[in-house]
Amino acid sequence: MASGANGSCEDRVTLVWNGMQTARLNADVEDGLYDGRLGELLQNDRVLFRLEALDGIARERVNSLRRADPDADVDEIEVYLAYQAQLRDALELRHNAPDMRFMNVSQVTEADVARAEASARDGKRRNFGTI
């Protein structure tokens, strides 16, 4: 139990750090840092879209775990961070931290990650095309 609490605490810092990096990316876009650099702007928009998609997927995974076992101790932080960490390279989320400490607490399976990647990529194609 104590290691689970520590895991949540350490990974909470990582998740907050990822959020701060995302906020910085948003601010850079809003401040015009990418004006005249369409390719980089589109890449950053894709990253932001993918992160939003992963948030929705993680939220649904948390809800699904709680529906399956209302008494289970589902750590939302671990679930959210698991998707970000596992898909960092595949979805080009380079501004996110590369690791998390307690992946085993997340209850996110390899199949969950594969479905999330496919969903984020499918959504990207629908919203960004081949640009």
Image (cartoon, grey):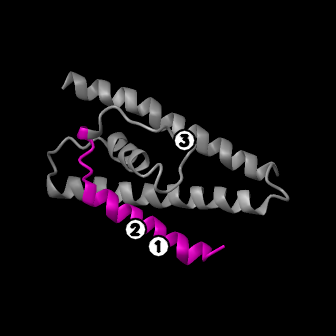
Magenta segment:
104-131
Distance (Cα) linking label 2 and label 3: 23 Å
73 left or right, relative to 44: left
Which residue is found at the position 24% from the left and 29% from the top? 4
Q: Mark 2 — residue?
A: 118
131 left or right, relative to 77: right
Using a 10 Å C-alpha cutoff, classify the residue at mark 2 as few (fewer than 14 neighbours), some (14 to 19) or many (20 or more): few
Q: Secondary structure at mark 1?
A: helix
Distance (Cα) linking label 3 and label 1: 23 Å
Q: Amino acid at mark 1?
A: Asp
Which residue is found at the position 46% from the left and 30% from the top? 13
Q: Nearer the viewer, mark 2 or mark 3?
A: 2
73 drawn magenta: no
Work out whether mark 3 precedes mark 1 in sequence or the reverse, and give the earlier one. 3
Which residue is found at the position 69% from the left and 63% from the top? 42
What percent of the width, then of the height, locates residue 130?
61, 76
Q: Nearer the viewer, mark 3 or mark 1?
A: 1
Work out whether mark 2 precedes mark 3 in sequence or the reverse, and give the earlier one. 3
What percent of the width, then of the height, locates residue 126?
54, 77
Identify the mark at residue 19; answer none if there is no mark.
3
Q: Are marks 1 and 2 in contact (CB under 8 Å)?
A: yes
Q: Are marks 3 and 1 in contact (CB under 8 Å)?
A: no
Q: Amino acid at mark 2?
A: Ala
